[in-house]
């Protein structure tokens, strides 16, 4: 036993017990730590740069970045100052602030395919609005989604169908990511009722190895939509701004008609956006979407500061560099310990899996557990996120933790 095995957990344990009394299941959704390795805390207290602290005062180098929103680092001074300044003047009002138009103009400027923006709060708002705009424009019903892809928690797309009735998904058809034949087939089943194809920039389904997009597949989806007069919807909620400044498919030259954004666009402040092109503007004008907090100005001020900082600091290059350093370090450690691993996805959103792991991710969970006890916060089966706040020194410090994690996996394998 080392000092790390004695990290305090008292308050977290107490809070979990209190939560079980007043929150269904003690916690819900993707942040339910009850499903995660024991060393990962449920309740967090503070964050700064790439470091987070749980309620018991334990510190971690953070490789989840709040599941994506934190792209510049926790407590980013420029973003927080912009949000606070706006909040102290006016946040939730009878009408939006000037900043709404400014942010829409900036996003239309930065994101190639975009001519207009609609703002909301969460990724699910954005993906659902994209589908509604596509249907309103095309006056058709069928929507193609990749088997296993996550587009949010609304009845039409939630992965857990308790409480969902078949009618909610009556017009969904499935294809396999990177398999153009399967998309062609699904599109012909939809026929002249095809409203949209929804796709993520690369395959980042939880519990699966990640898969980068084949540019020919992306181009193929574009031409199916062009041929059918349907909308190509890029779900950039998770990847937006981490893959490319102008939208995740900008580097491969495939422009969606509509894209859904959230997570990183305001560095942790609640904001989502649908961006669309001219063809879908009239449809976007026809639909009715809104929310009590969708016009709040503080998150939009945070969004504007985030977009500008990302652009001016070449943050993306920093994020990629940190991810590459982590990836190289993990690869060397795995080799050193004789542990066979796979690292998939882009370096800025990596995932580590273990050869021979089971469907409960026992090896990945052991690895994550030990890393957390040593002060590095990873996830066993959801992709990780790097931020512009991760320096070489942070990565090297985290690698001290992962080295011990690999040693623990080696031991587990030896005892099999
Ligand atoms: N689409 C993708 C690709 C996502 O990763 C997520 C969130 N994990 C969503 C949509 C839904 O976003 P939110 O949880 O903010 O509603």
Image (cartoon, rainbow, N blue to C red):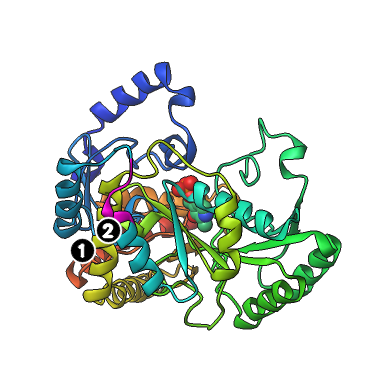
Corner quadrant of residue 163 = top right
Q: What is the crowding at mark 2: few (fewer than 14 residues within 10 Å), some, or many (at least 20)?
A: many
Q: Position of residue 50 (x, y in %)?
A: 23, 58
Query: Badge 1 is on which residue?
Result: 397
Residue assigned mark 2? 401
Determine the residue positioned at 29% across, 22% down.
Answer: 14
Quadrant in the picture for residue 322: bottom left
At x 80%, y 64%, the residue is 186
Q: Which residues are magenta?
A: 95-100
* Drawn side of residue 193 relative to residue 125, left or right: right
Q: Give the total number of marks visible in the rendering.
A: 2
Residue drawn 25% across and 77% down? Answer: 314
Front one among 139 and 219:
139
Left or right, 310 with reference to 116: left
In contact (CB < 8 Å): disc 1 and disc 2: yes
- Is residue 192 visible in the rendered image? The answer is yes
User: Which of 129 and 80 lies nearest the eye of the viewer?
Assistant: 129
Say whether mark 2 is within 8 Å of ligand 1: no
């Amino acid at each position: 036993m080392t000092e790390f095995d004695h990290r305090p957990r008292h308050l977290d344990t107490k809070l979990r017990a209190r939560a079980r009394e007043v929150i269904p299941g003690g916690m819900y959704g993707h942040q339910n730590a009850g499903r995660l390795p024991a060393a990962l805390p449920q309740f967090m207290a503070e964050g700064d740069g790439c470091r987070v602290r749980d309620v018991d005062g334990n510190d971690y180098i953070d490789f989840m970045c709040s599941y994506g929103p934190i792209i510049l680092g926790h407590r980013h001074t420029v973003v927080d100052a912009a949000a606070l300044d706006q909040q102290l003047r006016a946040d939730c009002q009878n009408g939006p602030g000037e900043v709404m138009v400014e942010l829409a103009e900036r996003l239309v400027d930065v994101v190639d395919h975009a001519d207009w923006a609609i703002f909301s709060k969460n990724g699910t708002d954005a993906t659902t609005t994209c589908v509604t705009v596509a249907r309103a424009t095309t006056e058709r019903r069928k929507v193609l989604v990749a088997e296993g892809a996550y587009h949010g928690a609304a009845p039409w797309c939630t992965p857990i169908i308790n409480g969902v009735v078949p009618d909610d998904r009556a017009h969904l058809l499935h294809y396999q990511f990177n398999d153009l034949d399967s998309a062609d087939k699904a599109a012909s089943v939809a026929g002249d009722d095809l409203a949209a194809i929804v796709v993520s920039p690369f395959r980042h389904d939880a519990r699966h190895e990640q898969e980068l997009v084949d540019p020919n597949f992306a181009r193929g989806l574009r031409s199916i939509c062009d041929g059918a007069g349907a909308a190509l919807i890029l779900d950039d909620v998770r990847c937006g701004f981490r893959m490319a400044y102008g939208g995740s498919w900008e580097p491969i030259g495939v422009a969606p008609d509509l894209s859904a954004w959230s997570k990183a666009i305001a560095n942790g402040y609640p904001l989502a956006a649908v961006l669309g092109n001219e063809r879908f503007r009239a449809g976007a004008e026809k639909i009715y979407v809104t929310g009590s907090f969708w016009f709040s100005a503080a998150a939009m001020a945070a969004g504007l500061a985030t977009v500008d900082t990302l652009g001016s600091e070449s943050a993306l290059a920093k994020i990629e560099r940190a991810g590459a350093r982590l990836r190289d370090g993990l690869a060397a450690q795995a080799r050193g310990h004789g542990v066979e691993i796979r690292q998939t996805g882009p370096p800025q959103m990596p995932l580590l899996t273990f050869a021979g792991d089971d469907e409960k991710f026992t090896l990945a969970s052991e690895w994550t557990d030990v890393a957390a006890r040593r002060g590095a916060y990873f996830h066993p089966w959801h992709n990780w996120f790097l931020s512009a706040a991760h320096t070489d020194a942070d990565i090297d410090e985290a690698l001290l933790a992962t080295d011990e994690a690999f040693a623990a996996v080696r031991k587990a394998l030896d005892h099999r």
